[in-house]
């Protein structure tokens, strides 16, 4: 839909063990939240049965992959979720969904032990908001041999000095440097470069960006295409709050507007709570533009 053509270095298919994610066109990553601390209630599931029903509906609405997490990134989270609590909640859901549906499932966590537990029962991708910066995360991902999504989070869970403190460095250059360093570290750890996806980590709070930076990241997303890896964006319900003063449940239109621009700039995987309208918006735009 007018997006820069992906070069031959950008894979059209991502192999998630026995399952394949076709990125020859933009695809939808649906969200299953197993933590009530999530900032958005859509996709929140409190049991295996709820997750099975939600996933079945999500696939019918256009989801090509589902991202399952129990580790909240909401800066207003009231209580820390322990590693064991994540495992206890995630494992039965991941196992049931992986057995029931043919699509890939990613585990949304930064904790290596949680990654291992989910991978053992059927998860076939790692989506890490901390970019595999927790001790042992790179090693788990390398042993598993599954695709990984490296996200940029400027201030991981409030730890401003973990990677970079306040800086005047241009946000685009900052992320390009971060991604180049993380790709290099991942490859050194034994992760295949073709298994790496990149996410600029659009958002506020722990993600560490302001309104202008988030807008630039969407508008200049194609700046990261020369890194040669598929781009993932999580725009869902993040636009329209600070810009328009809207509550989370009324940000669908703003999310769709940002999504269409992101796809036009080269995004190949759209992580969203609003699967059906996002799928339809992308397909209509493609049809109008003759793609």
Image (cartoon, helix red, strand yellow):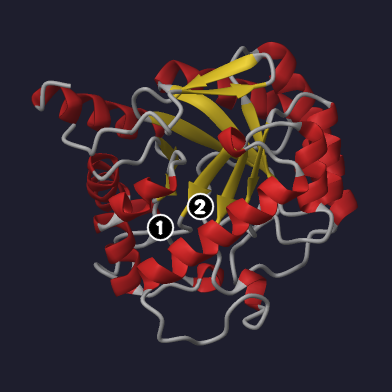
- Which picture quadrant has residue 115? top right
Residue 284 spot, x, y in % from top left: 18, 26
Position of residue 189 relative to residue 276, above or below, is: below
Count every numbered label the image shows and give the total.
2
Around disc 1, counting alpha carbons within 10 Å, would you say few (fewer than 14), some (14 to 19), or many (20 or more)? some
Is 194 placed left or right of 190 in the picture? left
Position of residue 275 relative to residue 160, above or below, is: above
Q: Residue 101's mark?
A: none
Residue 51 spot, x, y in % from top left: 65, 28
Query: Rounded to the nearest whole Å, what is the CA distance between mark 2 and mark 1?
Result: 7 Å
Residue 169 spot, x, y in % from top left: 41, 81
Q: Residue at x 29, y 61 (%)?
A: 240
Circle 2 sits on which residue? 40
Around disc 2, counting alpha carbons within 10 Å, would you say few (fewer than 14), some (14 to 19), or many (20 or more)? some
Q: Residue at x 40, y 28 (%)?
A: 27
Helix, strand or loop at disc 1? helix
| Residue situated in front as seen by the camera: 53 or 198 | 198
Is 190 placed left or right of 286 in the picture? right
Position of residue 227 relative to residue 182, above or below, is: above
Residue 85 spot, x, y in % from top left: 85, 50
Is 265 placed left or right of 32 in the picture? left
Q: Residue 248's mark?
A: 1
Q: Is the Cβ of the residue at disc 2 closer than 8 Å to that at disc 1?
A: yes
Chain-order first, disc 2 or disc 1? 2
Q: Which image quarter is the N terminus in? A: top left
| Residue situated in front as seen by the camera: 69 or 217 | 217
């Amino acid at each position: 839909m007018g997006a820069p053509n992906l070069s031959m270095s950008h894979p059209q298919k991502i192999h998630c063990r026995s399952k394949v994610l076709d990125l020859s066109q933009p695809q939808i990553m649906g969200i299953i939240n197993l933590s009530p601390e999530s900032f958005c209630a859509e996709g929140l599931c409190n049991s295996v049965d709820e997750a099975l029903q939600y996933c079945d509906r999500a696939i019918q609405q256009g989801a090509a992959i589902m991202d399952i997490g129990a580790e909240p990134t909401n800066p207003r989270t009231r209580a820390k979720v322990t590693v064991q609590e994540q495992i206890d909640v995630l494992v039965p859901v991941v196992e049931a969904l992986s057995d029931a549906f043919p699509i890939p499932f990613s585990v949304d966590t930064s904790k290596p032990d949680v990654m291992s537990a989910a991978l053992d029962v059927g998860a076939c991708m790692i989506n890490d908001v901390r970019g595999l910066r927790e001790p042992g995360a790179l090693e788990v991902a390398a042993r598993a041999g599954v695709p990984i999504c490296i996200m940029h989070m400027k201030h991981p869970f409030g730890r401003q000095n973990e990677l970079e403190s306040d800086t005047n460095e241009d946000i685009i250059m900052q992320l390009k440097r971060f991604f180049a360093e993380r790709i290099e570290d991942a490859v050194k750890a034994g992760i295949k470069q073709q298994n790496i996806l990149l996410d600029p980590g659009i958002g506020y709070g722990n993600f560490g960006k302001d309104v202008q930076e988030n807008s630039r990241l969407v508008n200049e997303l194609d700046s990261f295409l020369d890194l040669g890896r598929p781009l993932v964006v999580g725009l869902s319900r993040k636009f329209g709050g600070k810009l328009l003063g809207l509550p989370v449940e009324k940000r669908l239109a703003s999310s769709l507007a940002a999504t269409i621009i992101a796809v036009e700039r080269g995004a190949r995987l759209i992580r969203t709570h609003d699967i059906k309208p996002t799928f339809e918006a992308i397909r209509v735009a493609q049809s109008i533009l003759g793609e």
